[in-house]
Image (cartoon, rainbow, N blue to C red):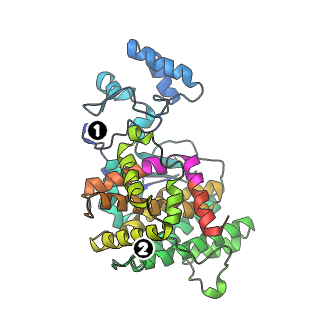
Amino acid sequence: MKYRKLSYFDEFHCRAGECPENCCRGWQIPLAEEDLTRYREMKGEKALGLNLRILLGGKDPFLNPTGGKCPYLLEKEGLCELQKKRGEEYLPLVCKLFPRRQINYGPVTEQSLFLSCVEASRLFLEHESGLHYIEDENGPDLPVYGDNDDEAYFRRVEESRERILELLDDTCVGNAPEAADGFYGFEEALKRIRRYAGALQDACIRYDSERLRELCENPVPVYGKEDADEEKQPDKSLFPLPITVLNELMSTRFYQKKMKEKIPELYRLCHVYFRIFDPLTEEAGQERFDELLSAYLRAGGRTSKYVHYLQYYLLTYYGEVFEDYSFTRRIDYGILHTNMLLLMDLCRFAEAGQKLPDLISEARTLAVYEKRGLHSRDLQREMYDVFTKYYLGR
């Protein structure tokens, strides 16, 4: 067994009551079996309410079944009442681990940090240009994720990720004032990566191990027009996506009125978007988006940030291809999340009178987007359907 962790993994320390975006609200907090055993032994009025929630939760109990504020959150202090009065051992397991993401693929256990935590996002922004895994002699003892035990295939998954990350490292992303020019290098890289992912997936479908080996051991190819498959690789923008597609993504369950109580920061940013774009026609909306993006780049918005965010996404989630073989879907997820992050950054930029945010505000935007956008499989599938309808016409 090998163990590896994200390069800044050990730098994380919870900010507790000083955190500007508390993780004790906005999503359901699941209870593990070891939590249930401990809580059933508790006494007192609070324990009665907790055990009632456990009882009503059935097979999948939650500390806060509706996803609202945790009943043990001390609002003024931003601390956990369970931890404060009974000790850290009474924290639910998920609260002890968050934002650490630890997954055992069988041959390797990888440890990363969910960016839905402001402090984890801050660390990402400070280290974004040097993201990599480092080997560790020891690691957590975890059950194996999934059923695939094909170690040779896992090596191919690792190799293909390395090839993609190498291409992104080499991507030339300028800070040109015009939106299209500012992301030209990234746009071209995304098209190559998506084509490459399709070739990997096709090799798996055909059980062509030699073709898979060839793809994984060599750099991502440069595809010429004579190689283009118009049905699979249409000449459409991948970054930034057109405003019509962003509108459809915003019209999924991504936005919900109950975010006002659960994730108020994201709720406010969404309403900035609605105020700017809802009154406009598609053509006027695209013009306004391009103007805002150009102003963002002129003000010093880092185009490289979005390349690095996609690298983070692939380092953290690409390994799931080992179980589901969905190379293109994983790449498409990364592309659409990178686009949505850009949109949220533009909303923050517009709200601030076209001024760039400080580090914590920037980290907060990233954290609240990830909190909503990446932790619901149903929502991700809905957003993926919007993306494939646009890009593939289905």
Residue 12, horizontal then vertical, whole percent:
32, 48
Residue 232, horizontal then vertical, whole percent:
66, 73
Mark 1 vs 2, N-terminal side: 1
Which residue has dot 2 on it? 169
Nearer the observer, 282 or 310:
282
Question: What secondary structure is found at the residue carrying circle 1?
Answer: helix
How far is disc 1 from disc 2 in space, using C-alphas?
A: 35 Å
Alpha-carbon neighbours of circle 2 within 10 Å: few (<14), some, or many (≥20)?
some
The residue stretch that appears in magenta: 370-382
Q: Quadrant of residue 201?
A: bottom right
Residue depicted at x 50% and y 67%:
282
Q: Amino acid at mark 1?
A: Ala
Residue depicted at x 58% and y 71%:
194
Q: Is residue 6 visible?
A: no
Residue 6 lies in the magenta stretch: no
Nearer the observer, 113 or 371:
371
Q: Main secondary structure of the magenta part?
A: helix
Q: Is residue 180 above or below residue 141?
A: below
Residue 378 lies in the magenta stretch: yes
Residue 326, horizontal then vertical, whole percent:
63, 60
Q: Amino acid at mark 2?
A: Asp
Q: Is residue 299 visible?
A: yes
Which residue has dot 1 on it? 16
Residue 256, horizontal then vertical, whole percent:
48, 44
Residue depicted at x 44% and y 67%:
285
